Amino acid sequence: MKTIQINGGSLSLILKNYESDIFENWYAQVAFHLKKQYPKIAVEAWTPERLYNNEKTKKVRGVKFRIFPTTISIRHSMEISWEMINALKKEAKIFSKKKEKLIIHFHEYHSWQVYLILLLIKKSKNIKIIAQHHGGRSPFANLRKYKRLFLAFPVIGLMQLAERFLFRKIDLFYPLSNEEIDYLKKVSPGSKIKFQTMGISEEYFKKIGRKKARKKLGLNLNKKYVLYLGRIKTTKGIKELLDAARELKKDAELLLIGEGVDFEKYKDYAVKNRIKNAKFLGPLYGEKKLLYLSAADCLILPSHTEGAPVVLMEALAKNLPVIATNVGGIPKMIKNKKEGIIINPNKKGEIKKAIKEILLWKPKNLAASAERYLWKKIIKRTLRDYERI
């Protein structure tokens, strides 16, 4: 068996440190963990990239990376690399004559690149296609969300038609939300559909006592700490979170870890509105991040839109109950009341109420429920799917 993990677009458009962060991306992580757990499988990772004029190859941890120049690059989902398409056509032609199976595993599928690949690749019994959702939307769903796209209605209409026609070639979808599941059932009723997320490593399950973590970080042993970990931007619900924190005053201190386009905006907002119990800590990684997850009393993610946030998995692994909004795949991740509280987006009052409630909890053994998100378990399920389709 051979699998090719195909990334959806130029990573330089979304990564700050492209040269290093490319190997932290979802498609690369799946490739690395597949190779680590099942070394006999041939694993490659392909991506288009607008920075290059020629194909670049690199072998990292047993995985062959092929980085193809883009032919068209408008935005992340509106890119085409003819070199990648032609290379994949060659692979498909070779495997159509073999008994060996070729798994083409797309990472995001609401894209021009995937439409063209599906149109031009000839399927055979040895070639199977899996499509992993990364939080993208169908063309008409994007039109509903962004009214300005109405001017491009003819193009969007063609894209929607392409999905309805071409997605039937996909054997298995891994969607990240109930909305996406409902959509796929309509446009590709013959395909298998399974909820599937990213994974987390074993390091998140290593126990660090709250008292020990707080001492290392210089935090008050007797205070209540609410942790936010993610990008600092409006669509993450940062304004509502800060407004709720202001009303909580001395009940809890809000710690915000991360950076983003609105970092300075909301840092200034907190100062101007005298929200003294909110601290912006900037981006933190590695041991520092693990210490804050161990030191906090709960994690909050009040996003307006999401896929299946990895930070929720990380928090549960650290025995940290969560507050998160009823968007994307979150309702599928927080499966019972002991794991956390689900609230509606854009509701300052619900945030405040949920924080007050969750700070009274005494969570036990949440890490056991988070084990389903271990990379080794996700990869085991993925390989089983590869073998069955």
Image (spheres, grey):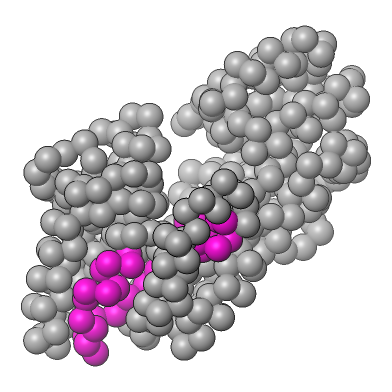
Residue at 51 percent of width and 51 percent of height: 151
> Which of the two residues, 278 or 210, is positioned nearer the viewer here?
278
> Which of the two residues, 31 or 128, is positioned nearer the viewer here?
128
- The correct choice, above or below, for 125 with respect to 210 in the image is below
Q: Position of residue 266 (x, y in %)?
A: 67, 20
Residue at 27 percent of width and 67 percent of height: 116
Number of callouts in the render?
A: 0
The quadrant of the rendering that contains the C terminus is: bottom left
Q: Position of residue 213 (x, y in %)?
A: 64, 27
- The correct choice, above or below, for 288 with respect to 45 in the image is above
- The correct choice, above or below, for 258 with respect to 124 in the image is above
Q: Which residues are magenta?
A: 114-143
Quarter of image, res 122 = bottom left
Quarter of image, res 158 = bottom left
Mark yes or no: residue 381 visible: no
Residue 134 in the figure: left or right of residue 171: right
Residue at 21 percent of width and 47 percent of height: 70
> Which of the two residues, 115 or 360, is positioned nearer the viewer here?
115
The quadrant of the rendering that contains the N terminus is: bottom left
On whether residue 18 falls in the magenta region, the answer is: no
Q: Position of residue 140 (x, y in %)?
A: 55, 63
Mark yes or no: residue 181 visible: yes
On whether residue 139 falls in the magenta region, the answer is: yes
Residue 379 in the figure: left or right of residue 62: right
- The correct choice, above or below, for 325 with respect to 117 in the image is above
Q: Position of residue 204 (x, y in %)?
A: 53, 44
Quarter of image, res 31 = bottom left
Residue 26 in the figure: left or right of residue 59: right
Residue at 59 percent of width and 21 percent of height: 263
